[in-house]
Image (cartoon, rainbow, N blue to C red):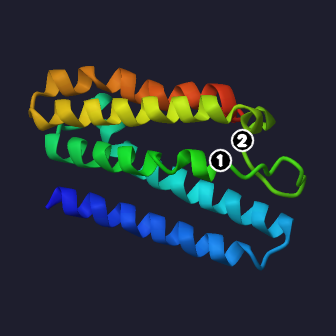
Amino acid sequence: MRKIAILLSAIAMIASSMVFTSYAQDMTPEEQAAAAVDQRKSLFKTIRYNLGPIAGMAQGAPFDAEVAERNARRIAVMATMIPEMLAVDTSAFDNIETTALDSIWDNQDDIAAKTQALIDNANAFADAAATGEMGATLGAFRAFGGSCGNCHDTYRVDND
């Protein structure tokens, strides 16, 4: 059942991406850039939504192996879209708000590598959670959470 839900989520995200692509053909470059930023923000908000309960468990909230595994597998699937969502250079448009640093557009290979690390670490975390053992699961959280931080530290404006 979980695999079906993950698959359906992935299909829905891919379908929305395809709709965006066909829609983007009728847009100005600035409109395309703004739409790309909106898509990126939506993806990252959804990833953050799924990471929230996991981070809570790492900070002492009650451990729920099923939620940890499910959410980590969702994140792994959604992460496959990150390079595509970061492929549209929006730096030329000053009136578009984004937290992406301009250096991101010149480092797509690094983005791909960091994305793969996130996917691998999310799946490793999910595998640990599937055992039901809290210690092993939370032990895998550092690498998983660090995958997000590695990219944020390099390519995102620090608003903290």
In the foreground, 61 or 86: 86
**Residue occupying image coordinates x 53% and y 30%:** 114
Look at the image and tell me in which quarter the C terminus lies: top right
Residue corresponding to mark 1: 86
Report, in whole angstroms, how far the alpha carbon at label 1 lies from the one at label 2. Answer: 9 Å
Q: Is residue 149 left or right of residue 25?
A: left
Look at the image and tell me in which quarter the N terminus lies: bottom left
**Residue occupying image coordinates x 24% and y 25%:** 138
- Which image quadrant for residue 146? top left
**Residue occupying image coordinates x 28% and y 23%:** 140
**Residue occupying image coordinates x 41% and y 69%:** 12
Q: Are marks 1 and 2 in contact (CB under 8 Å)?
A: yes
Q: Secondary structure at mark 1?
A: loop
- Graded by Cα atoms within 10 Å as few (under 14), some (14 to 19) or many (20 or more), the crowding at tag 2 reads many
Q: Is residue 134 left or right of residue 75?
A: left
Disc ID at residue 46: none
Which residue is most to the left? 132
Residue corresponding to mark 2: 100
Q: Percent x, y for residue 122?
A: 34, 35
- Graded by Cα atoms within 10 Å as few (under 14), some (14 to 19) or many (20 or more), the crowding at tag 1 reads some
Q: Is residue 127 left or right of residue 154?
A: left
Q: Percent x, y for residue 85?
A: 61, 52
